[in-house]
Image (tube, helix red, strand yellow):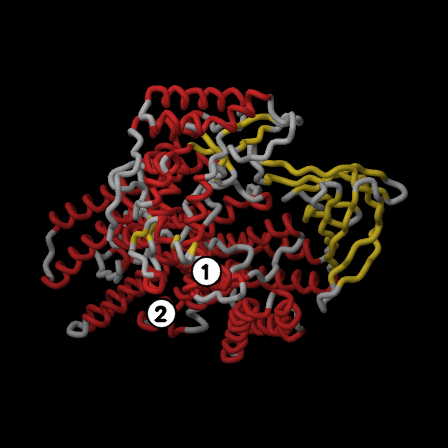
């Protein structure tokens, strides 16, 4: 029976992993029909559940926490089966003032079929809600009337708000461009949802039970004497032409700073000009300053002296093939991209890209073109939405100098101010009359405060953003954490090589490590708090923010575990430093942006935070495994002592693994509840959620030591945990950058 369980379990995991790649090449509809929706895939899950129940009965398992976990999964699978067999999902299209009583139901083969609703529904109105002062959508609301002949109700749906009538659940889905029509998702699942939610409740209780059960493995680990012994060895391997030209216009720093304190519409929110200037300079040059000039000075120089700055070699050309083929230096000027005989030298390659040539070289050309277009948007003023004014409906809009204005849209003087302001400011800057320029900047600041209404950030949010801009948290902290971790590692190696105790030195090193990491933790906490204040939401909305969150949780867990297990401190320093390094390497966009409507749920913070806790803990198990295997390689002269240390590392790893599985399980199924609230389906086999489930299933294997006693042996355990980390990397990075999907942060 064990072999049958192992084979079925492996087939389920392998099928899900393979399906995510097939979806990447063949599309979502193909895998939904031929894999996830196939009878044999359902049969695989049913067989796995049946074998698991039979094995538990055969082994006469009596521990309540273990029984509850497996019972919860059986109930969840039963609910999923009922949903698969009895639920109906579809779309109803409403037009304002029109009554409908049918909807288009989805069929297993991907087609649709018209079905009857148990009521009539009439759309009364539809409205899009925007983030203040922007065109970024915050929410959608449909107001309607439903009637079944006996009852007449007025209702509404919005993102993350469900309307239920006669066992039919309606969800806001989309809308018509003319704002007079709305699409609602229809879901009828009277049996599957209550059974599935019961399973989720049982699972939450069972996962917590794994940690609190006095007879459970986790509680026994906490009291295991072997975990109280000294420090262990850890090793993490990390790999960590300017052309002559006349000097361009350089605006004095005081004037540039004043300009940077103005506000503009940027990234769908109202932000200081300083934020845009920093992102602008980083995008072009790779750093927030250039030749000792601040980002605000660079921005104003390019704005008011474009020809002079076009000669400046500040556009970083990272791609070697692009430099080689186009004969560009590592840092090029705008003039390098325009030739008297060829015109815009990227033009031909951009056309080839549009025609389907999507290789690395053509992709690099597109990325470089984005930098050139950014400069051009500054030159024509379209990047500088500096001028707020309420429209005829009272909503504040931020306009740039090139905004088309209809007759009477703005008062004459305001329209003249918008059209002429940058020209007037340029005139004073070119004449070096900076006193008058400062006065003009002050006038624009007063204009913004007069007309912006409630769209300007609060003084606290503005101070928080300027502090965030002033200190490169990720850059500094990844250096600190990796340095502290590596120095603590070198000290541990020295002790092991010399094989002697030095209690006083040990205490000094431990206190220094703890003190530096506490400072790092405080700085990272400040960074998170500042981003929260600026965004007005929990900082968990994109890849950059989740990297910071994983680093924060890793340090927190290291402090908690380090009170009893000193080795946790260098572990935490190295892992948190790694995640901060990833966030620093420009792999992820650090910009603060408004949330999409579907993310405007209180479940967002809970779902992401709990998942990031799990990732941080699983990363610590990886370091334990890597350390143990290194010990096995260098400790052959003293096999008994090496075996003892490897087993102690196994126990420490299990101490991280149990709460990791609990938080990962809770996070996955909180996400499922959120999905059901938002879209009407709690599991859609999106690549991210599929790989999260794969990760959970792969890591869960090693805690079944009664079934698989080989995992009690340190070598087998650590090798498996080392390989299991690949699923975590695939879940976070692989899906983001290779597979895509609704959850992709790339």
Out of 653 and 394, give the one closest to the viewer.
394
Query: Percent from the top left, x then y, of residue 119?
Result: 84, 47
Query: Percent from the top left, x then y, of residue 43?
Result: 64, 74
Is residue 658 shown to the viewer in this render?
no
Q: Quadrant of residue 390?
A: top right
Is residue 202 shown to the viewer in this render?
yes
Left-right relation of 432 to 168? left
Badge number at residue 717? 2
Q: Name the residue at the right extreme.
A: 149
Q: Quadrant of residue 714?
A: bottom left
Q: Residues within 10 Å of mark 1 (few under 14, many from 20)?
A: few
The residue lying at 51 percent from left, 61 percent from top is 351
**Mark 1 to mark 2 CA distance (whole Å):** 30 Å
The residue lying at 49 percent from left, 41 percent from top is 267
Q: Is residue 163 above or below residue 656?
A: above
Out of 726 and 101, give the one closest to the viewer.
101
Q: Which residue is mark 1?
A: 737
Q: Is residue 154 above or below residue 424?
A: below
Left-right relation of 668 to 257? right
Left-right relation of 165 to 450? right
């Amino acid at each position: 029976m064990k072999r049958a369980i192992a084979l079925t379990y492996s087939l389920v995991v392998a099928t899900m992993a393979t399906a995510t790649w097939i979806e990447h090449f063949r599309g979502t509809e193909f895998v939904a029909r031929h894999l996830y929706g196939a009878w044999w895939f359902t049969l695989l899950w049913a067989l796995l559940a049946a074998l698991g129940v039979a094995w538990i009965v055969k082994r006469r398992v009596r521990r309540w926490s273990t029984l509850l976990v497996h019972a919860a999964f059986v109930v969840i699978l039963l609910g999923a089966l009922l949903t698969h067999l009895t639920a109906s999902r579809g779309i109803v299209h409403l037009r304002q003032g029109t009554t409908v009583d049918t909807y288009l139901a989805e069929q297993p083969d991907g087609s649709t079929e018209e079905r009857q609703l148990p009521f009539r529904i009439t759309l009364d109105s539809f409205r899009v809600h925007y983030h203040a002062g922007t065109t970024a959508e915050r929410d959608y609301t449909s107001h309607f009337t439903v009637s079944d002949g006996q009852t007449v109700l007025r209702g509404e749906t919005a993102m993350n708000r469900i309307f239920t009538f006669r066992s039919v659940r309606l969800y806001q889905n989309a809308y018509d461009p003319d704002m007079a029509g709305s699409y609602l998702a229809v879901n009828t699942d009277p049996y599957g949802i209550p059974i599935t939610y019961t399973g989720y409740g049982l699972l939450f209780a069972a996962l917590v039970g794994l940690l609190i059960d006095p007879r459970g493995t986790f509680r026994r680990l906490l009291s295991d004497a072997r975990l109280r012994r000294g420090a262990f060895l850890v090793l993490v391997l990390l790999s960590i032409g300017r052309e002559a030209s006349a000097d361009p216009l350089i605006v004095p720093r005081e004037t540039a700073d004043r300009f940077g304190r103005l506000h503009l519409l940027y990234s769908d929110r109202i932000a200081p000009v300083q934020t845009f200037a920093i992102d602008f300079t980083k995008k072009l040059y790779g750093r927030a300053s250039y030749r000792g000039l601040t980002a605000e000075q660079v921005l104003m120089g390019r704005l008011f002296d474009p020809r002079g700055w076009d000669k400046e070699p500040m556009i970083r050309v990272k791609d070697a093939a692009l430099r080689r083929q186009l004969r560009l230096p590592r840092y090029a000027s705008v003039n390098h991209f325009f030739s008297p005989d060829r015109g815009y030298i990227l033009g031909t390659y951009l056309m080839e890209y549009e025609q389907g040539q999507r290789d690395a070289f053509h992709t690099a050309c597109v990325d470089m073109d984005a930098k050139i277009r950014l400069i051009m948007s500054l030159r024509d003023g379209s990047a500088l939405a500096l001028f707020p004014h309420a429209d005829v409906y009272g909503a504040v809009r931020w306009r740039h100098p090139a905004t088309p204005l209809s007759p009477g849209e703005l008062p004459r003087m305001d329209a003249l101010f918008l059209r002429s302001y940058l020209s007037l400011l340029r005139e004073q800057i070119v004449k070096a009359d900076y006193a008058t320029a400062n006065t003009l900047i002050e006038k624009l600041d007063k204009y913004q405060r007069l007309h912006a209404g409630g769209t300007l950030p609060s003084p606290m949010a503005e101070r928080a953003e300027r502090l965030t801009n002033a200190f490169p948290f990720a850059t500094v902290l990844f250096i600190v954490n990796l340095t502290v971790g590596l120095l603590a590692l070198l000290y541990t190696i020295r002790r092991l090589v010399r094989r002697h105790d030095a209690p006083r030195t040990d205490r000094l090193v431990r206190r220094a490590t703890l003190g530096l990491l506490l400072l790092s933790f405080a700085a990272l906490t400040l960074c998170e708090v500042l981003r929260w204040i600026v965004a007005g939401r929990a900082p968990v909305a994109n890849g950059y923010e989740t990297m910071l969150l994983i680093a924060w949780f890793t340090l927190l867990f290291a402090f908690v575990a380090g009170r009893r297990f000193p080795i946790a401190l260098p572990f935490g320093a190295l892992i948190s430093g790694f995640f901060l390094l990833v966030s620093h390497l420009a792999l992820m966009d650090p910009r603060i942006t408004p949330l999409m409507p579907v993310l405007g749920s209180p479940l967002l913070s809970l779902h992401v935070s709990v998942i990031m806790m799990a990732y941080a803990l699983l990363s610590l198990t990886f370091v334990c495994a890597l350390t143990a295997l290194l010990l096995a390689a260098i400790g052959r002269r003293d096999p008994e002592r090496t075996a003892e240390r490897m087993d102690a590392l196994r126990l420490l790893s299990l101490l991280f693994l149990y709460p990791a599985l609990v938080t990962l399980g809770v996070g996955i199924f909180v996400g499922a509840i959120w999905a059901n609230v938002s879209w009407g389906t709690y599991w859609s086999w999106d690549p991210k959620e599929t790989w999260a489930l794969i990760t959970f299933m792969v890591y869960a294997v090693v805690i079944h030591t009664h079934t698989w006693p080989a995992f009690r042996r340190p070598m087998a355990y650590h090798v498996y945990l080392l390989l299991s980390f690949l699923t975590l990397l695939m879940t976070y990075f692989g899906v983001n950058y290779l597979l895509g999907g609704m959850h992709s942060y790339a």
